[in-house]
Image (cartoon, rainbow, N blue to C red):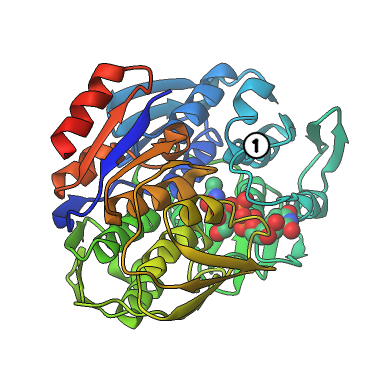
Amino acid sequence: MEQYFIKGGNPLKGTVDICGAKNAALALIAAAILTQEPVVISNLPDVSDINLLLDAIAQIGAVVERIDRHKVKIIGATVHSCVLNYEYISKIRASYYLLGSLLGRFHQAEVAMPGGCVIGARPIDQHIKGFEALGAVVDLEDGQIKARADALTGNHIYFDVVSVGATINVMLAAVLADGNTIIENPAKEPHVVDLANMLNSMGAHIRGAGTDVIRIRGVKSLHKTDYTVIPDQIEAGTFLFAGAATGGDVTVNNVIPKHLESITAKLEDIGCFIEEYDEAVRVVAGPQLHGTQVKTLPYPGFPTDMQPQMTVALTVSEGISTVTESIFENRFKYAGELARMGARIKIEANTAIITGVKHLKGAQVSAPDLRAGAALTIAGLAAQGVTQVGGVEYIQRGYEDFDVKLRSLGADIRKIDPADQEAIEQFRQKCS
Ligand code: UD1
């Protein structure tokens, strides 16, 4: 398995184009099989999570036609099975969205319990509560979730916790149900709104996505659409923090600045300068970053998916910072790796206490999950010396051409197979 080899110390400078949002695209792909007509999705990121979900819908019979690297045509008319093979499900968590869309369209679905990043227990009780409220019977047998309904009928659903996945899954199941569904306490993330927009463009009747109450009036069928995925706020935020942590000047292009507000607010807090344009945001690192406090929250709060990247920036910011993780209980697994790079970081319950150091130092580290992998890469870019980041396959689940984009900003980063001693030697010689 290839690893990133990074020679740190270059301030990142320049402009980078941001891809479509992975987490939105996953929901849109599941939504595409709610209709028999063709659905074209553009601005799709070319990352492994997306490609696996496309493989999964092809496996149950959908026609998946790649128009180009970022555009796909999906025809759901030929779907012939409501049973998802474990091989696909165990790799991506969001394959459970097929539960919602298959249940919505065929009134039955069987999907293995999901995999994905191991950042906490990640129960799915709220998804099940929502399906049951619509009239489905849901059983868990041998690691399979089996949902079945004679008919789906709209209902009033109050989520006990704010869940992106449960909100999306229940929307997928409810659009074709009889009558009205009201979802209270839903997630308000941009990708929830993006899903509602695409479903509405297919003839659904969804109002209130992005607010405290989503109202869905069931329709008999959905039709074709041609839809473009929103930009990825997390990919954008990752490059902004890479700019900040390396003392650089980075502009992220093709973004919706409004979606980045909680991120840019924290960058300003630690001493960066932010400029906003219509479709771009620029960060310029101040001469000295300083510490702050941050707590992850559901949107529009600071995203848990930006927590590791923010923590890395704080390891090289003057003073003492705290980062409190309130969404997932096991999301500081990378802290030990950062400590190996000289970070002064202590975890107490769900809070990281960080004392800023002048420089991190290169080391061999391993990514425990997707966002932590991106964060350790940023740490390597900010560090003195050479860093080797293992677990690149996690990073590729959610970042398209991460190393290529970083190189375009001036980073010294190469993806090398650790067995390729010659390539490693060449990289080290170039660095010395
Ligand atoms: C999605 C995102 C993920 C992001 C997370 C939080 C996708 C594919 N993934 O994950 O990148 O980190 O939102 O913004 O979009 N919970 C329950 N019961 C449930 C469902 C969730 O207790 O039935 C809890 C979870 O354990 C967690 C919290 O609710 O503590 C939020 O989880 P949720 O929003 O559902 O995350 P995901 O949809 O899995």
Which quadrant of the structure image shows residue 360? bottom left
The response on whether ligand 1 sits within 8 Å of label 1 is no
Instruction: Measuring from the top left, give residue 286's x and y in whole percent.
Output: 21, 77
Identify which residue is drawn at 59% across, 52% down.
333
- Between 118 and 193, the residue placed more toward the observer is 118
Work out which quarter of the rendered image holds the C terminus and state it: top left
Quick check: 53 left or right of 386? right
The residue positioned 29% from the left and 76% from the top of the image is 289
Q: Nearer the viewer, residue 399 or 125?
A: 399
Q: Quadrant of ligand 1?
A: bottom right
For this orientation, the residue located farthest to the front is: 432
Q: Position of residue 361 (x, y in %)?
A: 35, 53
User: Quick one: quadrant of the N terminus?
Assistant: top left
Q: Nearer the viewer, residue 412 or 23?
A: 412
Residue 326 visible within the image = no
Identified by mark 1, the residue type is Gly
Q: Kindly identify the residue that appears in the image at 36 percent across and 54 percent down.
A: 379
Residue 310's x, y, as percent? 42, 65
Quarter of the image holding residue 416?
A: top left
**Label 1: which residue?**
115
Across and down, in percent, residue 380 comes to 33, 49
Whether residue 254 is situated above or below residue 302 in the rendered picture: above
Residue 277 is left or right of residue 20, and the answer is left
Q: Is residue 91 above or below residue 168?
A: above
- The answer to which of 221 and 266 lies nearer the viewer is 266
- Badge 1 element: loop
Q: How many marks?
A: 1
Up-down relation of residue 331 to residue 281 (above or below): above
